[in-house]
Amino acid sequence: MTGPVGLITPSYAGDFERFSLLCDSIDRRLVGYERHYVIVDDEDMGLFQRFNGGRRVVMPSSRFLPHWLKRVPSLLTKGGRRLWWSLRAPPVRGWHVQQILKIAAAAALPEPRHCLIDSDTVFFRPFDIGAYAGGALTPLYCQRAAIGADARWHGPWTRNCDRLLGHPVTRFPADDFIGNVIAWDQRAVREMIQAIERATGMNWPLALCRARDFSEYLLYGHFVTHCPERLAEHEIRTRSLAVAYWDESALDRAAVAQMIAGADEATVALTVQSFSETSVSAIRAAVGLARDADPAPSPERQHVA
């Protein structure tokens, strides 16, 4: 072990029930971490305060965001959409801000390693996350040559990585570093921030807000793989810890259970994207964490990928 591992989850009121399920699964099935840091909009602090305590720390987003980036009141946005504005860059959405929060938190919080876990993830098997993320080498999830030049989102994100980090133009097909339950090393995050600021000539949150099309996971992966010293401190992992569902149509309990049943032994988590119409109760039931369920039997062993 190189040191303690922290967990980071940005969330907001719209993901409250999914976040609650994530916490239940962490409390029941995860070991090997120091703290679970939960970062929410300042106006959501009251709602999430019930989760504050023990190894879980609820923190306001204003602690990590630059002072010039302000939340637009929900009453002034269409459908209550979350927007942030400034005089320095075009408005950015909630998913942009969550990415900025992950980078800022991983650079500032005390642990030398962090695992980034979104609200729509749930652990369905016991797992020692300290053994996974806290060893001599940081696991770096990577899907080799998975991004084509014409990829609608991943293509622009990849090209912006080159510009933001000052790297040569990436050749396609490019590697994809986006996944669920992603481990980051703090020194690499801090050096990535420095690289962005050197390449763009501005502070890194402003550079990202002006870029708009970016991925925090692609930025980290591109930085590490272009830096021999940091790459030597990572171990490429091509198998994800989570099975994921990205469609909008709803899954029922049986379909969720089928996804879990089809997962290999190294897969310990399930991510059903929050924009899916799948009910949280269906996911709870499929992973054995229904509100009225009896306590699950003690696991025979911990899973370590």
Image: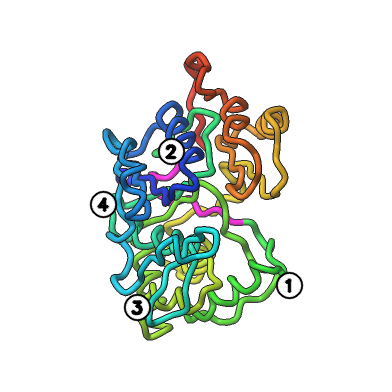
Crowd class of label 1 (few under 14; some 14 to 19; many from 20; radius 10 Å): few
Q: Which residue is identified by label 4?
A: 110
Crowd class of label 4 (few under 14; some 14 to 19; many from 20; radius 10 Å): some
- Can the viewer see residue 224? no
Sooner in the amino-acid sequence: mark 3 or mark 2:
2
Q: Nearer the viewer, mark 2 or mark 1?
A: 1
Q: Which residue is identified by label 1?
A: 150
- Mark 3 to mark 4: distance in Å? 22 Å
Identified by mark 3, the residue type is Asn
Q: Which residue is identified by label 2?
A: 129
- Mark 2 to mark 4: distance in Å? 17 Å
Crowd class of label 2 (few under 14; some 14 to 19; many from 20; radius 10 Å): many
Q: Secondary structure at mark 1?
A: loop
Q: Which residue is identified by label 3?
A: 203
Taking the image as shown, residue 222 lies to the left or right of residue 62, namely right
Sooner in the amino-acid sequence: mark 1 or mark 3:
1
Identified by mark 4, the residue type is Pro
Sooner in the amino-acid sequence: mark 2 or mark 4:
4
Sooner in the amino-acid sequence: mark 1 or mark 4:
4
- Can the viewer see residue 263? yes
- Mark 2 to mark 1: distance in Å? 35 Å
Sooner in the amino-acid sequence: mark 2 or mark 1:
2
